Amino acid sequence: MQDLSSGSMEPAAPALRTRVLVVEDDAELAGMLAELLTSEQYDVDLARDGQRGLHLVLSRPYDVVVLDRGLPAVDGLDLLARFRRAGRTVPVLVLSALGLPRHRVEGLDAGAEDYLGKPFDVDELLARLRALLRRHSDFAQSLPIPGGSLATDTRLVRLDDDRSVSLSERESQVLEMLARHPRQVVSRATLLDEIFTDAEDPGVVDTYVHYVRRKLGSGVIRTVRGLGYQLGQL
């Protein structure tokens, strides 16, 4: 194999923190969950209703969603179905006061990866989230990209023509974020907030997209004018 790695030097990129969306209409419980997950080093967004939850899932990349079933106006399982119809594969843990076996079956059949009844044990919730993230991470260590795949542990792209290309840490993080959400447009602001936290110039996002394209071809990342970037067509 031919190694097309670059010898350029760059500052170390910050580690990407696990991003969690909590969709819960009970203000006290939502606050408790946000405080708990933040103390466990998660980045947490809160949505108090289904419409806000849907907007956030469609506009931002998340690693896991904690979803209340008994939401006002939009049932949690209906919201989950909308996630899936929109192509969002983010793992979902449903929280619900409806804890009978048939309710759990309904949740899992609707597309949830896990289902936990209320009231719940905090340690069990955290353990279930860790297990969900572990399974999702193991499944997605090799991510398909146009013309090949990205090995997230080594930052090595293996191309279909049997070449290999080594990416820098930040190049890999940009491509990984897009590859983990292949149908989603990721805004420049999100890439800046998640990867380039120490950057003074927001144009650094466009610079690193250019670097990735220079190594892998222009079709690997698609520009969606006025919105951001999206993985190219697989």
Image (cartoon, helix red, strand yellow):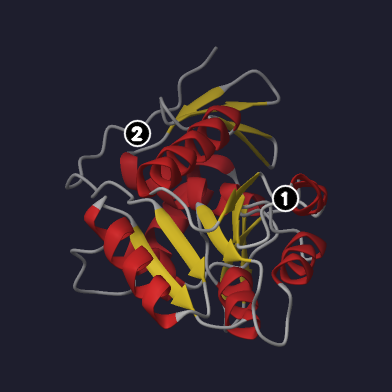
Could you tell me residue 114's position as x and y percent?
Answer: 63, 44
> Vertical placement of 183 versus 57: above or below?
above
Q: Residue at label 2? A: 6
Would you place residue 116 above or below residue 188 in this image? Answer: above
Q: Quadrant of the C terminus?
A: top right
At label 2, which amino acid type do we have?
Answer: Ser
Q: Nearer the viewer, mark 1 or mark 2?
A: 1
Q: Is residue 92 visible?
A: yes
Whether residue 112 is situated above or below residue 82 in the rendered picture: above
> Residue at the location (56% across, 37% down)?
136
Kindly state the secondary structure of the residue where label 2 is placed: loop
Which quadrant holds residue 161?
A: top right
Q: Residue drawn at (29%, 59%), measured in percent from left and top?
A: 36
Question: At x 41% / y 73%, what residue is drawn?
Answer: 30
Mark 2, Cα crowd under 10 Å, few <14 / some 14-19 / many 20+, is: few
User: Is residue 125 left or right of 80 when viewed as pictured?
Assistant: left
Q: Nearer the viewer, residue 214 or 95?
A: 95
Q: Closer to the N terminus: mark 1 or mark 2?
A: 2
**Label total for image:** 2
Q: Nearer the viewer, residue 225 or 136?
A: 136
Seen at 68% across and 60% down, the residue is: 98
Left/right of residue 165 with respect to residue 57 in the rendered view:
left
Q: Position of residue 72 (x, y in %)?
A: 66, 85
Q: Within 10 angstroms of label 1, few (less than 14), some, or many (20 or more) residues?
A: few
Front-lying residue, 142 or 95? 95
Which quarter of the rendered picture does the N terminus lie within? Answer: top right
Q: Secondary structure at mark 1?
A: loop
**Three-letter residue code for mark 1:** Leu
Q: Which residue is mark 1?
A: 100
Residue 5 vs residue 110: left or right? Answer: left
Q: Is residue 225 left or right of residue 194?
A: right
